[in-house]
Image (tube, rainbow, N blue to C red):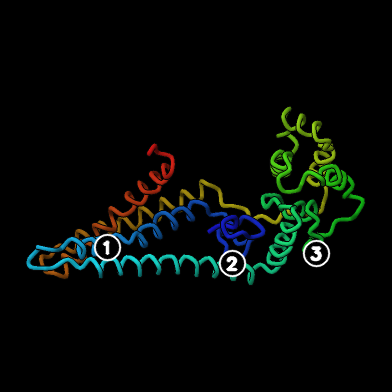
Amino acid sequence: QNGVSLNLAVDVPIAFLPSKDLFQGCNLLHSAIKMGFCGALTSFSSWNSEMVVMMFSFGDEGHNSEIIRALLGYIIGVQLALGSFIFGRNAAVYLHRVLNPGLAREMDAVAVKLTEGVPVNRNLPAFERRYLHELDDVQEEKIEPEHMSSLEQWKNTTKEHRRVNNEALPYLCDIEERVLKYGPTVIDDDMKTSSEKYGWDLKSLETWVAEKDASSFDMKTSTQSPSAKTAISVAVFLFVVFYTLLIIGVIKVNGDDAYSITYRTMLFSAIFAPPGALLRWRLSEYNGHLPG
C-alpha cells in the first residue's frame, strides 16, 4: 500500500522500502505485482468454489449439504484475509519507520500538527513541506537565512489559510503543488485570482522557485524513476523469454500419463494468465463507476 492509505508522512508507492530506493519509481512493476501476481495469487476462487460445493452438494451421489461447515469456512477465510491485511499494514508501517527514521519523526510531527488543526500536504517537496508547515524539529536540509526571504514571505501570507476546513486550503494546496513541482510556468489566471482574493504573495513563491533552481543548494529528495521506454523494454524482454520457455514446455511435455497432464495443464494456465491479469487490471477501472 502507498503512503496515503497508511497515513505516512509522504506518499511513497512502496511503504516498506527506503523512500529513495530506485524501486519506488518503477510504476509499471508496481502494477504488475499488485494486479498480476498478487491479484492472481489471492483470488480465493478455488476456496470459494469449494465452499459453494459444500453448501449445495445435497442429493449429489448421496452427499448431504454441509452448509454449517461452509459458513464456518467463509467466516474463518474472511477473518484470515482481514487479519493478514491488518498485519501487512502494520508490518509496512513498522518497516517504513525503521528504514526511514527521518520520515518517522516527521510522521509523528504531522500527527501533532493535525491535532492542532493544521493538515500537512504530503505532496510537496521535502524542504518546503517541512518549512511551510513549521516542522522544524525534523528539517534535515539547512539553507542560509539570506536565501529564505521569498519563501518566508509566502509562508507568512498563507499561514492563516492552512487550517482544517478553511475554504482557501484546497486552492492553496493546488498552487503549491503545481508551482513547486513544475515551476512558475504553470501559473495561470485562476492561480493569480485566488492569490489576490486571499492576499497571498504569489510573486514570492515564484521568486523562491526561480532562486532554488538557479542556486547551488540541492534539496531534491525524490527518487528518479526509470524512463518509460526502459521499463517497457525490460517488460517486453521478460515477456518474450518466459513465453518462449512456456511454449517449449508445452511442446516437450506431451505424454498421456498423469505427470505430463498435470504439468501441461499448469503450463497452459501460465500461458493464459498474463492476458487474464491484464484484462482484470483494465476492468478494475470500472469498479464503482458502473450504474447499479
- The answer to which of marks 3 and 1 sits earlier in the sequence is 1
Q: Considering the numbered disc 1 on the image, is that residue within a helix, a strand or a loop?
A: helix
Q: Residue at x 29, y 66 (%)?
A: 71
Number of residues whose C-alpha sits closer than 10 Å to that of mark 1, classed few (under 14), some (14–19) or many (20 or more): few
Q: What separation in Å lies between label 3 and label 1 (alpha carbons)? A: 52 Å
Q: Residue at x 76, y 29 (%)?
A: 193
User: Residue 176: x percent and y percent?
Assistant: 73, 43
The answer to the question of whether label 2 and label 1 lie on touching residues, with beta carbons closer than 8 A, is: no
- The answer to which of marks 2 and 1 sits earlier in the sequence is 1
The residue type indicated by label 3 comes to Asp
Which residue is under mark 2? 93
Number of residues whose C-alpha sits closer than 10 Å to that of mark 3, classed few (under 14), some (14–19) or many (20 or more): few
Q: What separation in Å lies between label 3 and label 2 (alpha carbons)? A: 21 Å
Which numbered marker is on residue 46? 1
Which of 166/235 is in front? 166
Which residue is under mark 3? 137
Q: Considering the numbered disc 3 on the image, is that residue within a helix, a strand or a loop?
A: helix
Q: What separation in Å lies between label 2 and label 1 (alpha carbons)? A: 31 Å
Question: From what the image shows, is residue 115 above or below residue 90?
Answer: above
User: Residue 227: x percent and y percent?
Assistant: 55, 48
Q: Is residue 156 left or right of residue 266?
A: right
Which of 142/63 is in front? 63
For the question of whether residue 130 can be seen, the reply is: yes
Number of residues whose C-alpha sits closer than 10 Å to that of mark 2, classed few (under 14), some (14–19) or many (20 or more): some
The residue type indicated by label 2 comes to Val
Which residue sits furthest left?
61
Q: Is residue 286 left or right of residue 132?
A: left
Q: Is residue 83 left or right of residue 246?
A: right
